Image (cartoon, rainbow, N blue to C red):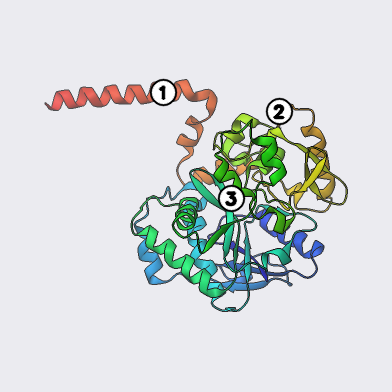
């Protein structure tokens, strides 16, 4: 099986290179592939990583022109997160008999990650995030034929939904093709027994979210646990990151409230949830904050520190000044700096005043024209 990362566009991705280097040092037998639309020489690719250059077809280009993405957001974030599903298929055609496991660039694979369990599957497999979408935290494909089919389904959806995202696409494909797509576990049977009286998630969904937990002997984090333990992306909050902020995590209505559980970690890099004295392994952590300390040497101590802090049940705020500077520079280049400044939370009232004033001026002009 190949571990495949996809990096499209020119957005910087320090966490990706750190993540790849970490995997190479910790998992000696992993065959890692990087798929990109940029030249090999332009990227910080480790010598042990196989490189594949993705080339956008004319058909794909025509399809994506019609999509109503906010093109300036994160150097084309919405575009590239969707197109990577097509890029994965293009790579897989060059290795049709190998299985692949796509990992998002900010996903930390934890020690003991069950690679062999994936290879026992003969269907596409990924995670469900919430009732509005699935998530590409990890996507397993057993062969090139299934990857090609997934790509074709995505292209078909694009033709009918100009606001399609990767999360909506994955959810629709899974829901309409239950015989070809299965759900990777984000709950265990023990967790369900703990959640039955505290969660509003329907039992049939819980059953699906936990069905494969015995096969993997643990669970995978779609996003909520990582967002709670390590914080949300500081680029969304002007350089600030709040860890253990339950309200912020629950805004997206994930199937799991991560604050309900007790976590355990140690210096060997394991992470577990404790339920009635039973430890349930978490095999990956979605590091939404892109915390480089979790991808660099000594990451085990960083994770252990965060887990220990979580037991205090108190929100912690961190600030990344370099992140803020990069945001200012990016918005200056994209000529969106004024809007960026006006959306600072403390300027909300001033922003509303400007919007109201603009509306009044427009109304007066319309009356004068009449």
Of residues 107 and 17, which is closer to you in this image? Answer: 107
Q: Which residue is mark 2?
A: 315
Q: Which residue is mark 3?
A: 208
- The residue positioned 70% from the left and 59% from the top of the image is 215
Q: CA distance from mark 1 to mark 2?
A: 29 Å
Q: Position of residue 40 (x, y in %)?
A: 62, 71
Q: Classify mark 2: residues with Cα within 10 Å, few (<14), some (14-19) or many (20+).
A: some
- The residue positioned 70% from the left and 71% from the top of the image is 49
Q: Position of residue 234 (x, y in %)?
A: 63, 39
* Precedes in sequence: disc 2 or disc 3: 3
- The residue positioned 83% from the left and 49% from the top of the image is 300
- Compared to residue 37, the image places residue 361 above or below, namely above
Q: Position of residue 12 (x, y in %)?
A: 61, 55
* Precedes in sequence: disc 3 or disc 1: 3
> Number of callouts in the render?
3
Q: Which mark is residue 75?
A: none
User: Do the residues under discs 3 and 1 have CB atoms within 8 angstroms?
Assistant: no
- Compared to residue 327, the image places residue 182 above or below, namely below
- Compared to residue 156, the image places residue 172 above or below, namely above
């Amino acid at each position: 099986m190949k571990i495949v990362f996809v990096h499209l566009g020119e957005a910087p991705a320090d966490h990706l290179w750190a993540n790849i280097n970490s995997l190479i040092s910790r998992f000696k037998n992993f065959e890692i592939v990087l798929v990109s639309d940029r030249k090999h020489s332009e990227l910080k690719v480790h010598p042990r990583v196989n490189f594949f250059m993705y080339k956008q077809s004319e058909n794909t280009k025509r399809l994506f022109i019609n999509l109503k993405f906010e093109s300036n957001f994160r150097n084309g974030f919405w575009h590239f997160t969707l197109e990577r599903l097509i890029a994965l298929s293009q790579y897989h055609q060059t290795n049709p008999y190998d299985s692949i496991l796509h990992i998002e660039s900010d996903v930390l694979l934890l020690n003991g990650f069950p690679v062999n369990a994936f290879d026992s599957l003969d269907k596409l497999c990924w995670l469900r995030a919430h009732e509005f979408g699935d998530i590409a935290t990890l996507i397993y494909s057993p062969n090139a034929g299934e990857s090609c089919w997934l790509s074709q389904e995505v292209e078909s959806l694009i033709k009918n939904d100009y606001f399609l995202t990767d999360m909506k696409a994955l959810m629709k494909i899974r829901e309409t093709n239950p015989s070809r797509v299965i759900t990777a576990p984000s709950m265990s049977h023990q967790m369900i027994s703990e959640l039955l009286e505290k969660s509003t998630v329907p039992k049939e969904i819980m059953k699906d979210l936990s069905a494969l937990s015995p096969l993997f002997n643990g669970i995978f984090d779609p996003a909520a646990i990582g967002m709670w333990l390590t914080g949300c992306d500081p680029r969304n909050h002007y350089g600030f990151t709040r860890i253990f902020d339950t309200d912020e995590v629950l805004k997206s209505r994930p199937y799991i409230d991560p604050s309900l559980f007790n976590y355990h970690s140690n210096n060997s890099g394991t992470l577990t949830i404790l339920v009635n004295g039973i430890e349930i392994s978490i095999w990956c952590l979605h590091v939404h904050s892109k915390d480089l300390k979790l991808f660099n040497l000594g990451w085990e101590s960083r994770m252990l520190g965060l887990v220990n802090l979580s037991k205090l049940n108190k929100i912690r705020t961190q600030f990344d000044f370099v992140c803020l500077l990069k945001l200012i520079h990016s918005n200056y280049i994209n000529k969106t700096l004024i809007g960026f400044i006006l959306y600072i939370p403390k300027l909300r009232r001033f922003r509303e005043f400007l919007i109201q004033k603009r509306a009044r001026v427009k109304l007066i002009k319309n009356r004068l024209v009449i």
